[in-house]
Amino acid sequence: MTTLTLAKALNAGLRRALTDDDKVVLMGEDIGKLGGVYRVTDGLQAEFGTDRVIDTPLAESGIIGTAIGLAYRGYRPVCEIQFDGFVYPAFDQIVSQLAKMHARTRGTVRLPLTIRIPVGGGIGAAEHHSESPEAYFAHTAGLRVVSVSNPQDAATMLRQSIACDDPVIFFEPKRRYHLKGEVDDAIPLSSAVPLGSARVARERTGDGPAVTLVTWGGMVGIALDAAVAAADEGVAIEVIDLRSLSPIDYDTVTASVRATGRIVIAQEGPGEAGLASEIAAVVTERCFHFLEAAPVRVTGHDVPYPPAKLERHHLPDLDRILDGVDRALGRVASAPAGAVTTQVR
Amino acid sequence: MPEPIRLLDEHGTRHASEEWDPWIADLDDAALAALYEDMVVVRRIDTEATALQRQGELALWPPLLGQEAAQIGSGRALRADDFVFSSYRENAVAYCRGVGILDLVRVWRGITASAWNPYDVGMATPQVIIGAQALHATGYAIGIQADHRRDASVDSVAVAYFGDGAMSEGDVSEAFVFASTFQAPVVFICQNNQYAISEPVRVQTRIPLVDRPAGFGIPAVEVDGNDVLAVMAVTRQALERARTGGGPSFIEAVTYRMGPHTTADDPTRYRDPAELEVWARRDPITRLRTLLEQHGAGGLELETRVAESADRVARELRAGITELGDPPALDVFAHVYAEPHPGLDRERDAYARYLEGFEGGAL
């Protein structure tokens, strides 16, 4: 066990994957000599060589398309898309080609790609560097989507994603690259928490009112802070770090909601047609008779990501999460202004 | 404008070429007859499949009529350990790779998206997204390079087939970038059949297509795509270049799509019949028949043998097509993931229970 930043934990996970399987190949812009714009691949080209850690031309569709060809040939590519907003040129190769290949070839062609994407905002960046594209990929059958929140998960889940025979979109919270934590980078994958499992990051305690707070990635830290603040007022928040966005571990979520009767789902991404809406729908279907209040979503607004000076008005922060918790507890009007609140007989 | 490389012209006259003759010096009369038979057979498959579509046995068929030499000439130059990434029109290449007759039509009957195991025949499932396969071929070639570094005896080649329309797609340009930067052992074969559905090639480019790869540092040749000898010669050269570490090549095979884009298309809406007459005179099969006759290797014996082959294939196709059963309902959920996926399993089980509520159950 060592204390590592999330970025260094990813580095350790990649190093171990490169060591354990000589078919693993890293591809991406600036990942070789530079070691990546966030240094996640720092030192790996020097250690494993230019044949295994490859600086690619500046062409996202080209990176994923050639990685697909490499996988056809039996390699296990780990591609880096430099920033979330740059994944869109590769969208066809990801959703039309990568996602569908196993099904369309009836299982004869496996494309075990891992696509690493620094995701999300909170870093005061220029346009297209703070996106939350998770929903597009969670909506696409054939892909697995994961989002890590802490250094240990970063190291282990990256190794698991690389070892997984399905294509995995691996989201890394860039606002948390400097977050430190204890990391064991040699956990045998057979005994690690399964890739598709959610984690109860903070259990509810006490007999007071309780709310299930579901989130992932860079928002987990804020959710935990909200839980500490709420505890001071006698409200127990059970924080669930989903970890996997496709598939979603609804068993863990629904077990919590059946106990608390209330759910808040928080995400950075815009709310419209996003993952929080999907989770709200499924939880309502499965836990309807246990719910004391309608599910509450705390999300980014339905706007293009704003300039840095306005970022704090877009990203859900601790106050907005606590406002969502209040709504779930019925302490403020649970519907936005203008909604129908009277019952129709 | 320079003429495309041509060894056998539309009149069946053989033109000597110091540069290209050595590449096909091994083709004796038996080999020429085999190429002739190949082209006749794949044209017959194409004709039958078109008829079967009109009869409602196939939902759709993309004919390759007129492009037989471009596909047979290149397809027969490949080794078993090479790997092909093609579009949906390369059924003659699939035939060369050993894909079964019925497997050629299975997709168009709506049974499956993939009619063969790519690793059995060294050919990927044909691509419908125009040009996407150029990147897959390039990546595969980069993989061959990596394998070659471990084992110098590995000298396979990846081959990408696409059309003139694909040359406008970004993925093809990106494939050229990667192929050139990595000097990957990939051959790009562009069948310029003059049309992308209704759009003539002048919509795709102001300059000859063969002039574009040079901008990426990739050697390119333009060949008469209806001359099976020239197509084979240039393909063999490109393969040899790739096998010996010389990097990628581009071949523009100039040909003509004598039929519609697919059986759902009506080319009378955008093509002049006079143009078809011009290209009919350039037929790839006719000119080879003439050459064989000149060699004394043609005539009744060859024609009878070849006709029997074509008839046999046609019978096999017609007899087998109605035996191709429909897939079971729950195949909808099959093979979406390589590893267990609880969410999808739950959906499948729910749908299976739903179907059981009907008479006949989950058919």
Image: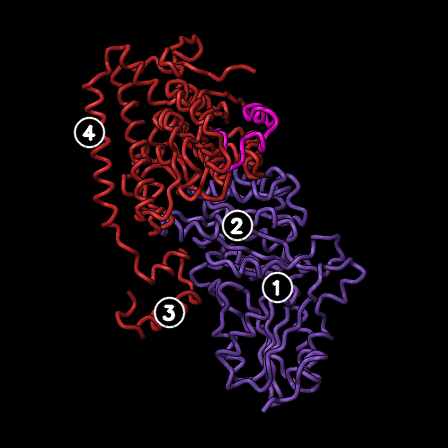
In the picture, one chain is red; tell me its letter. Answer: B
Q: Which residues are magenta?
A: B191-217
Would residue B198 be counted in the magenta stretch?
yes
- SS assignment at label 2: helix
Q: CA distance from mark 2 to mark 1?
A: 21 Å
- SS assignment at label 3: helix
Q: CA distance from mark 4 to mark 1?
A: 66 Å
Q: Which amino acid type is marked by label 1?
A: Gly
Question: According to the image, what is the colour scheme of the structure?
Answer: by chain
Mark 3: give few (<14), some (14-19) or many (20+) Cα within 10 Å.
some
* Residue B61 in view (yes/no): yes
Q: Residue at position x 81%, y 60% from top?
A: A309
Residue to which mark 2 is pinned: A94
Q: CA distance from mark 3 to mark 2?
A: 27 Å
Q: Mark 4 or mark 3: name the one nearer the start of the chain.
A: 4
Residue to which mark 3 is pinned: B351
In the rendered image, residue B140, in percent from the top left (x then y), is placed at 46, 37
Q: CA distance from mark 4 to mark 2?
A: 46 Å
Q: Which amino acid type is marked by label 2?
A: Ile
Q: Which chain is indicated by disc 3?
A: B
Residue to which mark 1 is pinned: A217
Q: Which amino acid type is marked by label 4?
A: Glu
- Residue B102 lies in quadrant: top left
From the image, which quarter does the N terminus of chain B lie in?
top right
* Residue B85 in view (yes/no): no
In the rendered image, residue B356, in percent from the top left (x then y), is placed at 30, 72
Q: Nearer the viewer, mark 4 or mark 2?
A: 4
Mark 1: give few (<14), some (14-19) or many (20+) Cα within 10 Å.
many
Query: What mark, if any, has residue B308 been given in the picture?
Result: 4
Q: Are marks 4 and 2 on the same chain?
A: no
